[in-house]
Amino acid sequence: MSARVYLDYNASAPVWPEAADAADEALRAGANASSIHAPGRAARARIEDAREAVARLVGADPAGIVFTGGGTEANNQAVRCSGAERVLVSAIEHESVLSADEEAEILPVTPRGVVDPEALDRALAADAPPALVAVMLANNETGVIQPVAQIAEIARRHGARVHCDAVQAAGKIPVDAAALGADSYALSAHKVGGPQGVGALVLRDPDSAGRLIHGGGQERGRRAGTENVAGIAGFGRAAEIVAARLEDFAELAALRTRMEEEIRAIDPAAWIVGADAPRLPNTSMIVMPGCESAAQVIAMDLDGIAVSAGSACSSGRVQLPYVLDAMGVDEAAAMCALRVSPGWRTTSEEIDLFVASWAGLRQRTARRVA
């Protein structure tokens, strides 16, 4: 990965060497964190240190951190085990939220890619059963940041709870769980440079989570199964690193803006999805008219540049991107969208290489059309 230009951080961030070292150390030490002998207590200490680090990253109480097998599991636990009689989810949620309740009501978004608070207010006023509202903090494809604090305030007025998928936002923008006001949040280690296969469900009320996985009493009885000590240790170290580097990540916005301006200068017909809404500092969804997303990804890959056509969870499927469809993007344009998501290690020179590759592909495409 280091030999290539990697601009797909939203799919998975490269692992921090320090996080890999923490995971390796825990893996070599071994032991079950539920054992009361000295090796077991050492494993338990690694988990609890990580719990505190992850809690600090999002301004939460460590007692409310439940380690899971990833963000998908955390989202499923929050939605499927909520006990709510009614579930409302935004149309642009990650598939792990959209698929968690097949009867969930879908909340519309504006053409800017932002959840419509007024639509939520009307929907909650229309029925009385206890409800759960699921709205992500930042969209994984467009990077558009959602008004979670406003959503939570509306939900509280109607006696509803809120779950927030913060997988893409944590480590990229400041996340204050208390200020945002949601009842639960989902996090994922590999989005912040930790190991894959580990995540967390963050609870405002530590006793509010229903069980998704049954068995032993691990994670204070909220998630059964022997803890992934190595993955959790790596997660904790990655959380510490990105928490200290939030200002560095914010500087990517200037790099992204330059990239987008150069793209539009090459082809004024190109456009950026969600450009007029608040976005993550590292995310651009660029539409190259007349060139399908898959062709762009392949061409970039041949040039040594890793980008994507959207969510990695949807790769391999040729279908209308549902996030762009929900925003009202024309189908022809939606099928030509490319997601570019640089990260902590991205350099200005790498952005130059991407722009040059994009320009070359645009030129070749224009010749074919002509």
Image: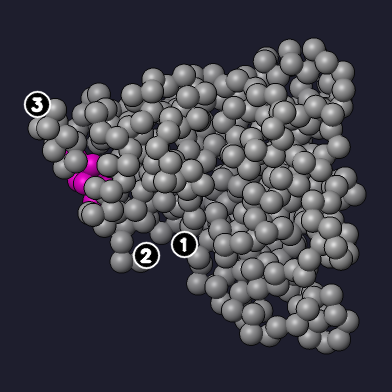
Asked whether the viewer can see residue 146, the reply is: yes
- Work out whether residue 259 or residue 222 is closer to the camera in this orientation and state it: 222
Residue 48, position as x, y percentages in the image: 78, 68
Q: Is residue 358 magenta?
A: yes
Instruction: From the image, tell me which residue sits under label 1.
Output: 14
Instruction: From the image, tell me which residue sits under label 3.
Output: 370
State the separation of the CA atoms marked 2 and 1. Answer: 8 Å
Disc 3 and disc 1 in contact, CB within 8 angstroms: no
Disc sitting over residue 1 in the figure: 2
Residue 357, position as x, y percentages in the image: 21, 46
Which sits earlier in the primary sequence, circle 2 or circle 1? Answer: 2
State the separation of the CA atoms marked 3 and 2. Answer: 36 Å
Which sits earlier in the primary sequence, circle 3 or circle 2? Answer: 2
Magenta: predominant secondary structure element? helix
Structure colour scheme: one colour
Residue 290, position as x, y percentages in the image: 24, 28
- Taking the image as shown, residue 125 lies to the left or right of residue 164, namely right
SS for tag 2?
A: loop
Magenta residue span: 352-359
SS for tag 1?
A: loop
Disc 2 and disc 1 in contact, CB within 8 angstroms: yes
Pointer 3: residues within 10 angstroms few (<14), some, or many (20+)? few
Disc 3 and disc 2 in contact, CB within 8 angstroms: no
Question: Which residue is found at the position 34% from the left and 25% from the top?
Answer: 333
Above/below status of 81 relative to 149: below
SS for tag 3?
A: loop
Of tags 3 and 1, the one toward the viewer is 3
Disc sitting over residue 336 in the figure: none
Residue 90 appears in which quarter of the rendering?
Answer: top right
The three-letter code of the residue at mark 1 reads Pro
